[in-house]
Image (cartoon, helix red, strand yellow):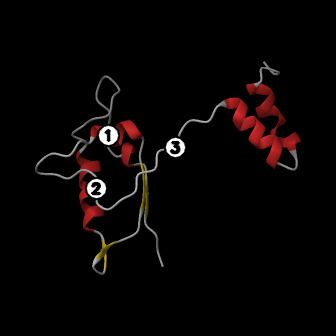
Amino acid sequence: MVLPVLDGLDEMDPLRPDGTPNPEASRARAALKKLNEYQDGLEAGPLVLTCRTGHYDALAPTPAINSRLIDAARVAIAPVDTHRAIDYLRNRILDTSRWQPLIGHHLGLYG
């Protein structure tokens, strides 16, 4: 069994001159079209697609092109507060000494 993964839909096309996502994004739109055509029998095939939220949202559907994955769940990852990440590491890592430079840097202990 193979699970296709497309990591970086947002990296397929250049940004606009002002640094914002390009809503035209022809490569990304073509990839979404092909992914929507991907079938496993009579059902949509399983796949994983990663893309920054702003880039995906910029690809608003047009009447001619459905630039959204059909029958797909959308998962948005929320930012993690630095102190919560450090607490997570401290509570779950057996050897915290190897993480100490990172933890110390984010707590302002190192220059």
Which type of secondary structure does the marked residue at label 1 adopt?
helix
Q: Nearer the viewer, mark 3 or mark 2?
A: 3
Residue 103 falls in image quadrant: top right
The reply to whether the C-beta atoms of the residues labelled 2 and 1 are less than 8 Å apart is no
Q: Which amino acid type is marked by label 2?
A: Leu
Of mark 3 and mark 2, the one earlier in the sequence is: 2
| Residue named by callout 1 | 57
Label 3 Cα crowd, 10 Å radius (few <14 / some 14-19 / many 20+): few
Residue 77 numbered mark, or none:
3
Q: Which amino acid type is marked by label 1?
A: Asp
Residue 91 x %, y %: 82, 44
Image-based side of 41 in relation to 80, left or right? left
Residue 81 x %, y %: 64, 31
Label 1 Cα crowd, 10 Å radius (few <14 / some 14-19 / many 20+): some
Which residue is at a point 41% across and 52% down the rendered structure image?
74
Which residue is at a point 30% across and 62% down the rendered structure image?
35
Of mark 3 and mark 1, the one earlier in the sequence is: 1
Which residue is at a point 27% across and 63% down the rendered structure image?
36
Residue 19 x %, y %: 35, 26
Of mark 2 and mark 1, the one earlier in the sequence is: 2
Vertical placement of residue 4 versus 91, above or below: below
Label 2 Cα crowd, 10 Å radius (few <14 / some 14-19 / many 20+): many
| Residue named by callout 2 | 32
Image-based side of 57 in relation to 100, left or right? left
Looking at this view, is 65 or 79 the one in front? Answer: 79
C-alpha distance separating marks 3 and 1 = 15 Å
C-alpha distance separating marks 3 and 2 = 21 Å
Looking at this rendering, what residue extends furthest in the bottom direction?
41
Residue 69 falls in image quadrant: bottom left
The reply to whether the C-beta atoms of the residues labelled 3 and 2 are less than 8 Å apart is no
